[in-house]
Image (cartoon, rainbow, N blue to C red):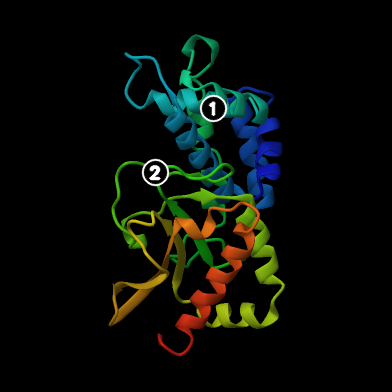
Amino acid sequence: MTPERFWELIDSLGGVADDETCERLDLELQRTGEGDAFADEVEVHVADLLRHCTVPAGMPEDSEEWLAAAVVAAGRDVYEATIAAGGEIDAARWRWRDAEALLVAGWSSHAAAVDTTPRDHDPAFPVTLQWKVAAPPVGVYTSHGVDDLGDDPETGVATSSDPAWDRARRYLMDDAGLTEELGALDWLDLHLVVREDSEVAEPELRPYPSPDAVRSVVLAVPQSLFADPDTRTEAYVEAVQAMVAGLAGRIQR
């Protein structure tokens, strides 16, 4: 889901997330089949806001996400201004007790169209992007936090988005040869994981749960390869191409 589409859907809430507005949004997501992608984006934006801002002490347990969801529901300009300002979010300004509804928006539409495959990536492009770094660059959103459970997708996936990744996917899907090769690997769960240079010195293919019983493959890459915003799209393209080339003929069903 592109950032523009995400914020278009958010704008349909009219600035407030509650049971009524999110129910209407759920119906739209069910109609378009975007529920899972939208829920992922909400998670990413809530996590990013809570990384940059604090919440008042004494709020009920888990309600910090409700407060962040209320800010997201206000729209892109308010959300970005809140992140830029940093500091403590003024809870009195927001109808945060109702905003829990936004945190589960899309779940019902996802359940209405259950994917029988266990993979959780976009079926239109079977490689999932994950940024697992402490300070992602501007424009990159990730749910990765202080807890690091490793790269095995079975232990959890850091939901991430980047407009450069959207452009890279469109370019790669126009490559008929590559899409054919990806189709031959559709039984695998494929992930591109960006990590700190201190953790990954050069691109490395990692099979999970083991080299003898492969269910998922991660290409771990150093963050420095994606530091330049002007070349990040190209770097994504080259990384996916390298992943596919590295798997060709090496891993069998």
Question: Residue at position x 30%, y 57% from top?
Answer: 150
Q: Which mark is residue 83?
A: 1
Question: Residue at position x 60%, y 57% from top?
Answer: 232
Badge 1 marks a residue whose secondary structure is: helix
Three-letter residue code for mark 1: Ile
Neighbourhood count class around disc 2 (C-alpha, 10 Å): few under 14, some 14–19, many 20 upward = few
Three-letter residue code for mark 2: Ala
Q: Is residue 28 above or below residue 187?
A: above
Badge 2 marks a residue whose secondary structure is: loop
> Residue 80 in the image: x percent, y percent?
60, 29
Q: Is residue 86 above or below residue 146?
A: above
Residue under numbered circle 2: 134
Indicate which disc, 2 or 1, sits on the residue closer to the N terminus.
1
Residue 82 falls in image quadrant: top right
Q: Is residue 235 left or right of residue 206?
A: right
Neighbourhood count class around disc 1 (C-alpha, 10 Å): few under 14, some 14–19, many 20 upward = some
Q: Is residue 47 above or below residue 228?
A: above
